[in-house]
Amino acid sequence: MTVEWHEMSALALGEGIGAGEIDAGELCDYLLERIARIDTKHDIYLRTTPQRARAEAAAAAERARQGLRLSPLDGVPISWKDLYDTKGDVTSHGAKVLQERVAESDATVVARATKAGLVCLGKTNQTEFAFSILGINPNYGTPANPFDDKVARLPGGSTSGGAVSVARGLAAAAIGSDTGGSVRVPSAWNGLTGLKTSFGLLPLEGVLGLSTSMDTVGPLTRDVADAAALYTALMGRYGAGNSHAPDLSGADPARIHLALPENLVWQDLDPGIERAARGAMARLEAAGVTTREAEIPEFDAVEELISHFGPFHAAECHALWHEYIEARPNLVYAPILERIRLGGKMPASTVEEARQGLGKLSPALHARIREVGVLAMPTIAISPPAIAELENDIEAWKAANVMTLRNTRLGNFLDCTALTLPCGKDDNGIPVGLMLVAPSGWEERLLRMGSALEPILSA
């Protein structure tokens, strides 16, 4: 069976370019043509960068001919969330109030990816200011989840367009950001692998912010190997004689220990989510993975702390963007406007108390994981609702946002790294994700573990 270019993994495309079987320039044109043909509403890509993409692809094609490739991903086209600066292009954070903002230089991680030979196709849609997990953006349009051709369902956010760009074959991979789950949620609902990196691991220069204390950079990919390769590029590790991603071999399922939290994250699941996630755990156990249930009191403590103090990152978002939104509040989607304004009412002492409380909980959780094993849980508790049910109903929007965020945001508040892997589908045929959560700095361990579990989960 012939596999089309838009169905191939990033590494497979890179291998084809290196072997002379795929011309990087032709691949770039192929994907730009697909974007023009499929994304007619421009709700997946807010804007493409064809001139840049073709120039980068032509350079990659020439390097391949000369045997001077920069990395295994040299010549592979990817999408970037609309909060990464690319020189000379509009970067608007998914917001109409920033639609005239033109970047003066590339974000540091964009520059690193370019140095590895990756081709920038353009900027993808997102929730305004990245401040919602649902992916709804009425101002630019909301890209529908591609796994339901009858009901337009949520794509997940805030990296909505990035996830859909990969799921619909409009990019080989996407780069998003994750402050409360914005890489993992859209990855899970779109059948992708999503890596939430540790806070502070990847530079945020040239990345439009939501939370100065929790924003992270991360890839959305077709599989774990691609996630590892993109992670390597974003870390700036390609070049200078280093052309390989982390070694993912050698992880034995029989030596993997996973802990299933007894509290919060496995509770109140949609039936289809629970069936898929429990089935995934059963397959892992049958393959030799050791599992145990464990009480994780830090989870309950986080919920109590945020309930008491409020979402302190709203204050950080308000500090960053309030001048822009108050200049033209009519251009901001009402629930997002309300959330940002709420941040402006939070006293500095409240924000600092919340941060200090979380700072005490994080080391305790990390120690617990080292004792009981990497935590495993459904990435999201609910299946994606229909867009029409929430777009104009603020209360329904809030309720769905809370439940969608519930599991993923714990890793952000508690300074963890996390990986979501596809593990099945719900009753509507929408993908379901299983999330692994580990202490900050465990990215390569998680990727190696994910590589071992991936074929079992996809069986």
Image (cartoon, rainbow, N blue to C red):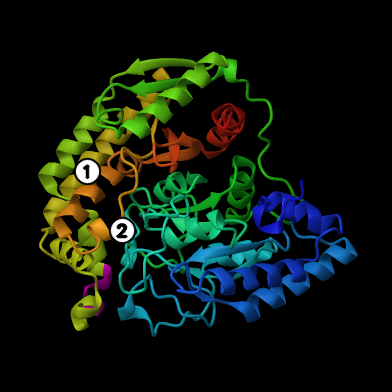
Counting from the top left corner in percent of width and height, residue 217 is at 47, 55
Describe residue 373's horizontal placement relative to residue 297 as left or right: right
Judged from this view, the residue extending furthest toward the right is: 66
Of 71 and 156, nearer the camera is: 156
Query: What is the span of residues highlighted in magenta in the rendered image?
Result: 320-324
Q: Quadrant of residue 26?
A: bottom right
Counting from the top left corner in percent of width and height, residue 112 is at 61, 62
Counting from the top left corner in percent of width and height, residue 45 is at 49, 70
Q: Relative to residue 267, is residue 134 depicted above or below? A: below
Residue type indicated by callout 1: Gln
Q: Which residue is mark 1?
A: 356
Query: How many labels were placed on the picture?
Result: 2
Q: Relative to residue 13, is residue 264 depicted above or below? A: above
Residue type indicated by callout 2: Ile
* Residue 323 drawn in magenta: yes
Q: Which residue is mark 2?
A: 387
